Amino acid sequence: MSVSGVATKELTKSPFVKSEIKNIDYDVVSATELVKNGTEVSIKIVLTNISKEIGSSKLIFYSELVGAKGHIMDKVLQSGSSYTMNHKNVGEEAVISWSGEAPEVKRRGSFTLLNITQVTTEGEYLVESIIRGLSSEMTEKALNVYYKAKKAIEEANQTITNATEAGIEVEGATVSLELANEHLSNSLGHYNSGRQEKALEEAKQALTYAEEANNLVKGAEATTEIRNYGILAAVVVIIIVVLAFILMQRKRKRGIY
């Protein structure tokens, strides 16, 4: 997801207030640090060192959380709303609470939990920007198998190249590698279209064919090695027979029987 609105601006950190994130709670996708889509997110921020050099400033809030809402002092907030802060009367600190639901997504991406900017007579500044990665269990499963398949394909491609250079016949492995690449491409297409179950299915097929290609090359290498050992053994036997024959002939010439 893209960061839009005021969050797209490159702003200098505010010199008139300090922001401290006290707490961020959300569920994560298994074995990752990514926010799990469709789950509740809650944030607590404390503003301190509120400058008394200016009379007031306007805080603007932006969030991509679904149903985003929050509070500062007695003001109820939502994404796009603002709060005029009286610097002389606000006290030593101001607490901001914020919550909402992580959006449902069909692909991995990043999104803005909360962005706070400050508008003063001196200009516009950044107070806080909290951006996190967002995904789903199915998306991460599909990506995990996709990257495994991609790595297996790279390995198969290298082993096939090495075997070909060594003069080993690997036609079957080459066919399996082509199928692996085709399924991997299909998986990526489904992923980009948001069809993660299909992406996972195609990635599994790609991994299967890539592993098959690797195994076929190993089998061909083993067969070639066995054949080479057989040829070597035959050559050794022939040499032994020839040497024995030569030795026998010499003995006969000497009259030794």
Image: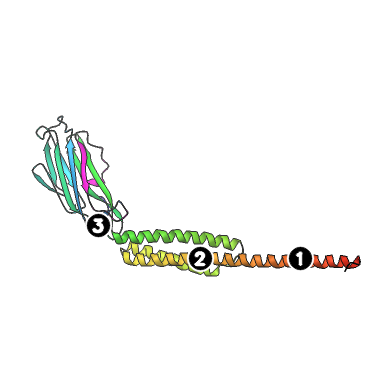
Q: Is residue 114 visible?
A: no
In the rendered image, which residue does mark 3 sit on? Answer: 37
Image quarter of residue 106: bottom left
- Quadrant location of the N terminus? bottom left
Of circles 1 and 2, which is in front? 1
Crowd band around label 3 with a 10 angstrom C-alpha radius: few (<14), some (14–19), many (20+): many
Q: Is residue 99 above or below residue 47?
A: below
In three-dimensional space, the C-alpha distance between marks 3 and 1, rounded to whole angstroms, equals 75 Å
Badge 3 amino acid: Asn
Q: Tag 3, which secondary structure?
A: loop
Q: Tag 1, which secondary structure?
A: helix
In the rendered image, which residue does mark 1 sit on? Answer: 240
Give coordinates of residue 151: x percent, y percent: 45, 58
Give coordinates of residue 72: x percent, y percent: 12, 43
Q: Tag 2, which secondary structure?
A: helix
Badge 2 amino acid: Asn
Q: Is residue 116 visible?
A: yes
Q: Which residues are magenta?
A: 6-31
